[in-house]
Amino acid sequence: MSTATTRRYSASDVARAQFLRAVRYLHLRDDLIEYLLTPKRELIVHFPVIMDDGRMRMFTGYRVHHNTVKGPTKGGIRYHPDVNLDEIRALAMWMTWKCALMNLPYGGAKGGVQVDPKQLSKNELRRLTRRYTTEISILISPEGDVPAPDVGTNPEVMAWIMDTYSMHRGYSTPAVVTGKPISIGGSQGRIEATGTGVMFTTMEAMRHLGMDPAETTVAVQGFGNVGSIAALRMWEQGCKIIALSDVNGGIYNSRGFHVRDVMRYQKEHGTISTYPEADAITNAELLTCRCDVLIPAALEGVIDELVAPGVKARLIAEGANGPCTTEGEEILLDKGVTFVPDILCNAGGVTVSYFEWVQDLQGFFWTEAEIFERLRRLLLENFRAVWETAQEKRVDMRTAAYTLAISRVVEAIEVRGIYP
């Protein structure tokens, strides 16, 4: 399995290549292309944290704004040992296209701290979060840049960010961050939003491809917040979930898993890799197992030119951001594989984050049923637009999604003009 640690490619290079492939169909001026490829601002912060033993330890964090033409920037904050500026740049650019594709009034951003959160106590993690928030507070605000959870962060971390920012302002400011606990202004359905959105878009792709859920086998790499909910929702739709994995390894059963039972086991044991009545497999073996639908829902770059030839799935639904390298995708497209690209497939999270932001600003909250109905409607509306664009231009789904997203950002640029 390719990981961030053993990465042999640049995430920014992948993001640029995907963009450049799409703009061939838009006939944009070179200066406009350069503008769209260039991040608006990048902040690198080095800051100390007092550890539980009283010693001071230095950490490095990032916050990147890719584009702000459509509105405030939106993007998650990840805590991971391999966080770096190249990765954050790519993720910020992907957020710009994702928000534009979903017609959200946002530009793209991303942030992160180079840390293994599992190696820190809760008190150390809280102190790190408060200090990092203070360092990037020159950028974040409800009107300017609204963070959210990502890899290694959760609603509790978002609560600490919201509280820290509010202490600086002198009053509670719930709209500065999304993905918060419901008790302090979070939205119903936010935790399940990304995985549920993966299900909505994957089921729609299956419908277009004539795939019967009862006869469809699914493998899901990554059993975190996104992958576990995606697996659960696909299972609830009647699909057979035959392979699952987490950071410790994977499990396989050709008869299919009872996903709720696997989730219960994970909660009790901290991993699914030792789940009984299953064959142990590696994360790499999961990606190449015989299945109809593959949902990579872990980190980026796991399907490269070495893995792609062995992939047997007919449909790949990208629950993670950038799980497939450019070289890997070319191999799979040549094999006739259909993609539900990340900027569409996993857009449920940012969409419900938008709902949360709106609810916080207006002080009026919606029910979970209302949230998921709005989410379903937006995702399927934009899925159909991408599908029709792909058929019309005779391109793959990712290129179609990018052409739509980029054209929406370009329209906003042309309407606003270039200052001064």
Image (cartoon, grey):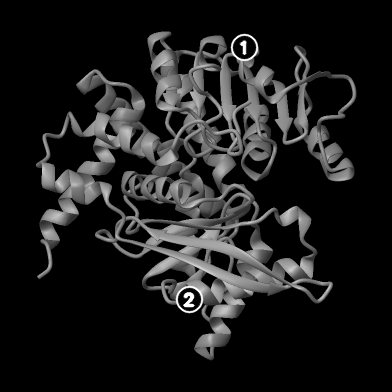
Q: Residue at x 78, y 35 (%)?
A: 260
Determine whether the residue tagged by mark 2 lies in a helix, strand or loop.
loop
**Which amino acid is tagged 2?**
Ser
- Placement of the C terminus among the 4 image quadrants: bottom left
Going from N to C along the chain, the mark reached first, 1 or 2, is 2
Where is residue 419 shown, x and y percent of the image?
A: 12, 68
Determine whether the residue tagged by mark 1 lies in a helix, strand or loop.
helix
Question: In the drawing, does residue 381 fall left or right of residue 352?
Answer: left
Judging by the rendered image, the residue that carries numbered circle 2 is: 137
Where is residue 87 shown, x and y percent of the image?
A: 47, 46
Q: Outermost residue toward the bottom?
A: 170
Whether residue 172 can be seen here: no
Q: Is residue 101 above or below residue 139?
A: above
190 or 129, nearer to the observer = 129
Marks 1 and 2, how far apart in space?
Answer: 50 Å
Q: Residue at x 78, y 16 (%)?
A: 253
**Which amino acid is tagged 1?**
Glu
Judging by the rendered image, the residue that carries numbered circle 1 is: 215
Where is residue 383 shown, x and y percent of the image?
A: 37, 33
Are discs 1 and 2 less than 8 Å apart at CB? no
363 or 128, nearer to the observer = 128
Q: Residue at x 66, y 69 (%)?
A: 128
